[in-house]
Amino acid sequence: MKFTINPEKCTSCGICAEECPAEAISRKDESSLYTIYQPFCIRCSHCGIICPADAVICDAGDFSPWEPPEINQQDLLSFLQGKRSIRHYSEKPVSRDVLETLLFTGSVTSTASNRQEWEAVVVTGEKVRELSRDVMTFYQGIYKMARNPLFRFILAFTEAKRYVRNPGTFRKFRRFIERFEEGGDPVFFNAPAAVVLHAHKRHKQWGLTDCVLAGAAMMYGAQSFGLGSCMIGFAQVVLNFKSGLREKYGIGKKNTVHSVFTLGYSSRPYRKLPKRKPIPAQFIE
């Protein structure tokens, strides 16, 4: 997108320059009009949505009018608390229109320096089952190797140490594999849709920040459609480990997956709010 200032409408009030977080808006002297220095502009839209004279032009279209909606704080808190990680889905598919709306919901969230460093892959139907099998094939191989005492000793010095050092955790992982071999889907829980958010490795932490923010917005947006969701760390780990698998699902070899989550209609109703521990906090005044 490109933002410019219409000299015929600009009143030189200077609000846009004060609002611009990138300091991309300035004027030569007191008698000049304001202009936007394009190399500094981060396309955040602040100038356009704050201008009282409608002088800012965006080549992507006009700015939509907006008034802060009245939201009851208790209703909002209840909505946020009611977000559950769903692991039992009905067979009802998620429509393409809803999925596209959720992608748009993710795109309007805040991002690091407004970089919007994200890409998405939306997997639906049988392709979710295929992705699940691909992920579980990887873990099957890990499990077979982990049964070897020497390999388990080596794993004890990696991120997998919590699985091999704790007998209870290792038994849980074994059951995880058995559920798959018995025909279950312990990764995506037979969800009708899954979303993979990723960004190029060169974006480093900004890609991570942007994908996590977009994913959270999409999952809360899904709740407004009566949909459930669940973060799938097992799939994220495998996709980042196997570049060939990323490529199979349209993710560049040089991209990092930062968020994977399911979408679908829960087959079980939830009737009460969960308990959560408060965030440990310090107030420094």
Image: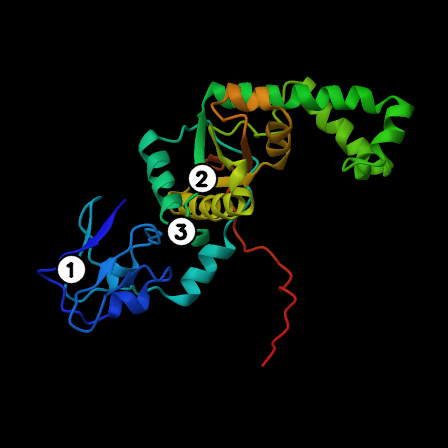
State how far apart marks 1 and 3 are (Cα).
Answer: 22 Å
Mark 3, Cα crowd under 10 Å, few <14 / some 14-19 / many 20+, is some
- Disc 1 target residue: 55
Quadrant of residue 153 within the rendered picture: top right
| Relative side of 238 to 107, left or right | right
Whether residue 259 appears in this view of the structure is no
Q: Residue at x 83, y 31 (%)?
A: 155
Q: Mark 2 — residue?
A: 118
Local secondary structure at mark 1: loop
Measured as percent of width and height from the top left, residue 216 is found at 48, 47
Q: CA distance from mark 2 to mark 1?
A: 30 Å
Which label's residue is closer to the chain start, 2 or 1? 1
Residue displayed at 57% across by 36% down: 87
The residue at which mark 3 appears reads as 114
Q: In which quarter of the view is residue 33 placed?
A: bottom left
Q: Amino acid at mark 3?
A: Asn
Residue at point 15% right, 60% down? 54
Callouts 1 and 3 close, C-beta under 8 Å = no
Question: Real-space Cα distance between discs 2 and 3?
Answer: 11 Å
- For label 1, the crowd category at 10 Å Cα-Cα, with few meaning under 14, some 14 to 19 and many 20 or more, is some
| Residue 119 visible in image | yes
| Above or below 170: residue 140 | above
Disc on the earlier residue, 1 or 3: 1
